[in-house]
Amino acid sequence: MLAPLLGAGQASRLSDLLLIPESTLRPRSSTISRIEIAQALNMLLFEKLLKAIPQGNEYVQDAVGAGNKIRFDHGALRTVLGPSTGMLPAGETAFTRILLPLGYYLNGVYPLLRISMTGRAYTHRDDPEEIAQFFLSELHPGQFSAAFQATVDRVLSTSQDPLDPHSVRLLQQLAVETALPLADALTLLSVLVRCFDRQHELLSVAEYRILLAESAEMAWISTEGNAFNHATDRVADVAQVAAAQRALGRSIKDKIEVSANGRVRQTALRASMVSRPMRDDNGKLVEMQVPGSFYEFISRERYLEANSQTSKLDLSFDSGNAQGIFKMTATAENAEYAAQASPAVKPTTARDE
């Protein structure tokens, strides 16, 4: 599936980077199961993110050079539960219509109150511990000022829906039959990858300033859309990895986030700054430096499940951890820029700190 979409060489290189779950390594067939499609999509999205994150790509190349493979734990993306999202369904619905047919189920809801968002974890039914999860978050614009809400509506109202009617029918077929013919699986995959991108038109510098003054998260969505906010490598010891990356001079989060139950630990490299076009007051395109995506590390411990008395990997997330990790796209430069643009309003990032 990867070779026709990436080319044989790149497909082979990507397969060498990632630890591929044994559950997806099936004999060649004219039909492709949902778990194979899910794994292929995860790999394509991981590859797409690495192109956008120089430090993350350097880490991956170092790991592979040392004989290791990346254990893709989860990808995170952001949506907006707003009244005006154009042709794109509002909030997480834009992606649950994809994830549920692929075999994912809702495995946890995480209120992110400090940043006016709700996070939800989606886990794969066929191999929960090895197929990468999705951490899908929704921003609630109704909890911000009227000017902010009007700007969100104006920006997102131009959104287009990358899912065409044929792809919708293929997802419906996949939901019922749990498999697709190879040709259909390839057609669907090429469309699904495009769903993880910005779907709305370019915004103006003035609109960006309004959003950034109240929510670094919404400002990020305004330039990056539904792209992966971050991808995560599951490692044995987050602290050890963080120390090694810091010694190499890479910009990594100072603090390791620890879940309330103590079993999940996370940290991350700082978001890469990227250049994005916006319109100035005269409608002319200008390039602005804004935070892009980032690369994360997570350690998960096993525990004894009370009812079944079986050992399970803790696949949960933690609201505190998530809000700490989300600050990777809320840089000091952003806070300063927002303060200059709208001195009467404190940025969300300053409040969270």
Image: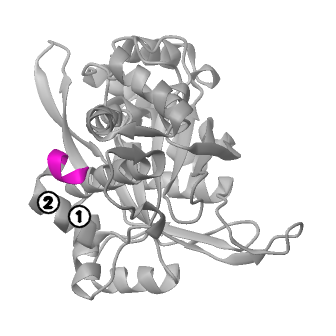
Q: Given contact means CB atoms under 8 Å apart, are the residues at marks 1 and 2 in contact?
A: yes
Q: Please tell me which residue lies in front, 329 or 84.
A: 84
- Compared with 59, 135 (above or below) is above
Q: Residue at x 49, y 41 (%)?
A: 102
Residue 227 belongs to magenta span = no
- Compared with 159, 329 (above or below) is below
Q: Quadrant of residue 39?
A: bottom left
* Secondary structure of the residue carrying numbered label 1: helix
Q: Amino acid at mark 1?
A: Leu
Circle on res. 197:
none
**Residue 347, horizontal then vertical, whole percent:** 49, 38
- Compared with 326, 176 (above or below) is above
| Colouring method of the image | one colour
Q: Residue at x 18, y 45 (%)?
A: 5
The region drawn magenta spans 1-5
**Residue 143, horizontal then vertical, whole percent:** 64, 24
Circle on res. 10:
2
Q: Which residue is mark 1?
A: 14
Q: Please tell me which residue lies in front, 165 or 110.
A: 165
Q: Please tell me which residue lies in front, 38 or 327.
A: 38
The answer for how far apart the CA atoms under marks 1 and 2 are is: 6 Å
Viewed as shown, does residue 174 lie left or right of 196? Answer: right
Q: Quadrant of residue 13?
A: bottom left
The local crowd at label 1, few if under 14, some if 14 to 19, many if 20 or more residues have their Cα within 10 Å, is some
Residue 277 seen in the current view: yes
**Residue 29, horizontal then vertical, whole percent:** 33, 51
